[in-house]
Image (tube, grey):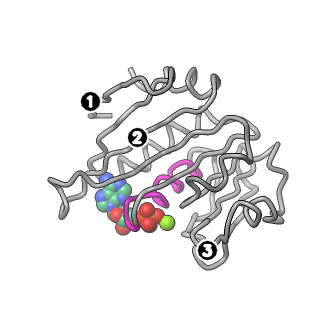
């Protein structure tokens, strides 16, 4: 990836910031994350509308070997994809009322054996898994009209901290 990852230490964990120039590169980044995924993983995506959360989720899904097209679950709250290396639950928390509702989501998959990706989940769903990876997507202010996105990967827990070390050279 033609990026200059910047690392910083947040609360003892290593956070990684990556400049992603195009949607295609965002999908590639998703593919690299997919390799690291294990049953029970929770990924929380945040960032404004159009930041690329769904594009990143699509890259993760493709990397898991999911053949179906992953679309934004905005109008259905959640979709479950079962044809990949691990079951994938893709949630859009935009319309969730709060933590209780997030907990109540009666998903057709067992969270312990699946990977769960939640868009708009920051502050809402972190309690659903002990460890999680928070991904914050933004458009650099100098590039409002362009395609560049900044992706910040914020590991929570030792497992994600360790795995992120292997993500980038
Ligand atoms: N570097 C980039 N990364 C991701 N998406 C990009 C990038 N540059 C342009 N785009 C476009 O921005 C849009 C992002 O949409 P989407 O992933 O649905 O956003 P979100 O889910 O965050 O609301 C897509 O149309 C995508 O093609
Ligand atoms: Mg989306």
- The foreground one among 55 and 68 is 55
Q: Residues within 10 Å of mark 2 (few under 14, many from 20)?
A: many
Q: Which residue is mark 1?
A: 4
Q: Is residue 1 left or right of residue 153?
A: left
Q: Please tell me whether residue 24 is drawn above or below residue 19 in the rendered image.
A: below
- Residue at the image position 83 percent from the left and 63 percent from the top: 108
Q: Earlier in the sequence, mark 1 or mark 2?
A: 1
Mark 1 element type: loop
Residue under label 2, please give it.
152
Disc 3 crowd, CA 10 A, few/some/many (<14, 14-19, 20+): few
Q: Is residue 19 above or below residue 13?
A: below
User: Mark 3 near ligand 2 (CB under 8 Å)?
Assistant: no
Q: CA distance from mark 3 to mark 1?
A: 35 Å
For the residue labelled by badge 2, is the local secondary structure a helix, a strand or a loop?
strand
> Is residue 137 on the magenta stretch?
no
Which residue is disc 3 drawn over? 95
Is the stretch drawn in magenta largely helix, strand or loop?
A: helix
* Image quadrant assignment for residue 97: bottom right
Which region is colored magenta? 49-62
User: Is residue 129 in view?
Assistant: yes
Give percent across and percent down for residue 155. 54, 32
From where the camera sits, is residue 166 visible? no
């Amino acid at each position: 990836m033609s990026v200059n990852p910047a690392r910083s230490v947040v609360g003892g964990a290593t956070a990684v910031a990556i400049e992603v120039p195009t949607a295609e590169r965002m999908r590639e980044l998703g593919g690299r994350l997919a390799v690291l995924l294990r049953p029970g993983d929770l990924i929380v995506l945040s960032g404004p509308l159009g930041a690329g959360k769904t594009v990143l989720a699509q890259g993760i899904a493709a990397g898991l070997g999911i053949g179906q097209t992953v679309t934004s679950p905005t109008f259905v709250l959640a979709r479950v994809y079962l044809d990949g290396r691990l079951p994938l639950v893709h949630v859009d928390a935009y319309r969730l009322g709060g933590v209780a509702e997030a907990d109540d989501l009666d998903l057709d998959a067992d969270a312990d054996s699946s990977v769960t990706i939640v868009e708009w989940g920051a502050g809402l769903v972190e309690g659903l898994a002990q460890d999680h990876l928070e991904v914050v997507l933004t458009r650099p202010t100098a590039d409002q009209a362009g395609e560049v996105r900044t992706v910040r990967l914020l590991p929570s827990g030792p497992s994600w901290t360790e795995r992120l070390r292997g993500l980038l050279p």
